[in-house]
Amino acid sequence: MRNSVLQLISDESYDGGEVDGVSLTTQTQTQERPPTSEGDGQVTVLGRVAGHCYDHRRRVLVLWILAIIGITVVAQVVGTQFQNKFTSGNTESQQAANLLSARFPSQAGDFAQVVFHTSTPIADNRAAIESVVNGLRPLAHVSGVVSPFSAAGAHQISPHANIAYAVVQFDEQTANLPPGAVHAVINRAEAAAHPGFQVALGGEPIGSVQKISPGASEGIGITAAMIIMLLAFGSVVAMGLPIITALFGLGIGVALLELVTHFLVVPNFSPEMAAMIGIGVGIDYALFIVTRYRQGIFEGREPRDAVVTSLMTSGRSVMFAGSTVVISLFGLFLIGQPYMIGLATACIAAVLMVLISALTLLPAMLGFAGGAIDKLHIPGLLQNGGPPPENGFWHRWSRFIQRRAWVTGTVAVLVLLLLALPVFSMRLAFTDASNDPASQTTKQAYDLLAQGFGTGFNGPLIVAVDMHGPSDVATVDRLDAALRAGVPDVAFVAPPQINAANTGAVITVVPKTSPQSGQTETLVQTLRHDVIPPAVQGTGVRALVGGQTAGGIDAANFLGSRLFLVIGAVLILSFLLLMTVFRSVVLPLKAVIMNLLSVGAAYGVMVAVFQWGWAGRVIGIGEAGPIDPWIPVTMFTILFGLSMDYEVFLLSRIREEWLRTGENSTAVADGLAVTGRVITAAAAIMFCVFASFVINDPLHILKVFGFGLAVAVLLDVTLVRMVLVPSIMELLGPVNWWMPRFLDRSIPTIGVEVTPPPPAAPRVPIPTPA
């Protein structure tokens, strides 16, 4: 039976390159099935696309240039509406916000603080402060300003009398405020600053419009990618094409994202995150296609034939890999939160556009390059497009791992488990202004308020009380007394504010600890479950703990509860896709387990560095703190797609060798030898792109996200792909390819990469340029 399989594969009339549907029950027992034609239609489509783009390359290039210019201009004219609106559904904090909007319409909008720091006593600067306050009152969308010298602002001057603040009340919530109105407040307030009289502004409206100047992260990542591809190809032309196509796709993706902000809630850090993902996957996708094109030129194919072949083979894998990244990102929609949908859409737009660019613009650019793909080369570095030499490094590495499969596999698993240990202490919470760059006014305001009034002053808790009339005033007084009666971690309780109709009251509680502290989260739960219920029991009065800090805590808890739902959905999808592609139930199960190990290890390292503060100063993370709750779930969906990319690229070659030889050990060694170089180069590029956001981006959350992805890619391509995969596949032997016959017959056949037909011309390799 094995001979019949080998005969079928060696038959030149079969151009599929692999026998789909092979079901293995023992080492020598196989069940052959005629190759299906399901994949042929898709191959034809990609081949036609490649040929069309090659033949009309000038038109394709012009269309891409016009598209990027047109969409960018439209985006600039329309403007953007990024919103850091981290809601959490119908939680208690959201109910409190709704109650305040109904009972206190004048305070329905958000507020900001204008903080004053003087070298002399605040009282000596009263005229200057009042001038700022009076200048803010007539501004658009400002419903009121509470001066620190008014009766209502009696507690707005620090005990040391050199720090004070004014409260600017807006008439809209941050999501609905025109950015221009907030900028007007910032400009008017900061214009009053002078030596000895510092002015800083804080609050959610200020943070929403604050533009943090991006570092040169993208430039550093692209430069590193250029160096790696020069080492991999040795050719300037071959190196430049992936960069150009990735930047074209990313440019349109970011412009589309700016338009999407008018329809979805998109956080203001989304463009940088989309750039991080788009550059990484875009260069990798183009790298795979250019590698296959150079192989075609080496085989003696005409440039057009090589372009068509590269899209029919590596282009097919790229399309599958890009589709899995997009599908996995759709898993974020399961969370059901508007800002997560906006964040996922940002990444999807970037991935889709770089994918389309790789499948259309790159074939056109290869048409311009033609057979001169290696003309501009670095002496001594040029690598031809031929297969790796026998007994090369990767073949010898695989054999080294396979001969010590138990030892190397066990060591790799133990290392991953050790790195994953910190994940059990991961605390999810939204970071606050304390993590902003020191040059930002929000960071300065945060530090001044913490210095003058205590760290908890930056995250007050708002107790919203739903009253039924004057008879409930006594209940409000009793609740106020309970909040003041020595509740742990409460620094200050402001007097209750009751509206004129006696239908609502507000009590502000200032914690002793910072907004992102675990003690503050404990205080919120203590107020909700232990302090408030006894004070209002039996009265019909409802009291809810809200405010921005409580809202962040509720959102973090909500995301934490949905994390396992998303992970479960992604893992099931991963299993089903790999089972369908490789006709095995063992390989997908192995991939799922290894995926969990590598992601868990990345989470653990991320917690140790950013939450525990280990080596934090080395990479400049600023203050240690919790992990933003959206990061782990978003990381997992993206890493699933990226790891699927490498998994498919490696396993497809191993399976091809297995079907050709029937020898599991040989198939693993040969498959790794063929793919090891390009997978390592692709992963190195991805690592450098992600790591560049750690060392050079001022935004804390992007540092955390980039660090987590960089570590995950590094672990995935080293310990997982290059150690665990060959060791485990060696230990399992033919069991790797076991597939129940009923499943083999019932699931569709999806080919990822096929063997192209031989070149029409004689296979005379084109000489390598001198």
Image (cartoon, grey):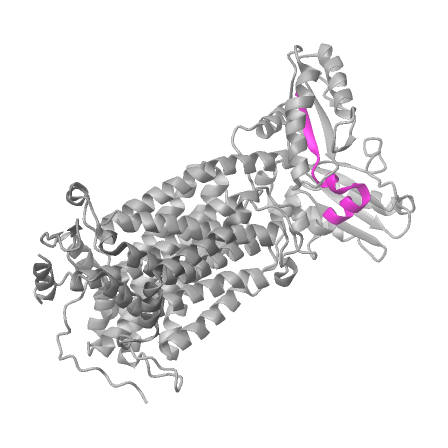
**Residue 503 visible in the picture:** no
Report the residue that reaches farthest toward the bottom: 770
Where does the image place residue 299, in percent across and percent down from the top left? 21, 77
Q: Is residue 452 magenta?
A: yes
Q: Residue at x 75, y 21 (%)?
A: 482
Magenta stretch? Answer: 446-466
Question: For the C terminus, which image quadrant?
Answer: bottom left
Q: Nearer the viewer, residue 111 or 638?
A: 638
Q: To which quarter of the image does residue 127 belong?
A: top right
Where does the image place residue 582, in percent across and percent down from the top left? 24, 53
Q: Is residue 104 above or below residue 310?
A: above
Where does the image place residue 637, in percent across and percent down from the top left? 42, 48
Q: To which quarter of the image does residue 678 belong?
A: bottom left
Q: Residue at x 38, y 75 (%)?
A: 232
Q: Residue at x 66, y 49 (%)?
A: 183
Compared across the picture, whether 234 is left or right of 501 comes to left
Question: For the N terminus, which image quadrant?
Answer: bottom left
Q: Is residue 429 above or below residue 89?
A: below
Q: To which quarter of the image does residue 104 belong?
A: top right
**Residue 409 visible in the picture:** yes
Q: Nearer the viewer, residue 254 or 766?
A: 766
Compared across the picture, whether 21 is left or right of 237 comes to left
Compared across the picture, whether 655 is left or right of 403 comes to left
Q: Nearer the viewer, residue 637 or 255?
A: 637
Where does the image place residue 306, in percent across and percent down from the top left? 22, 72
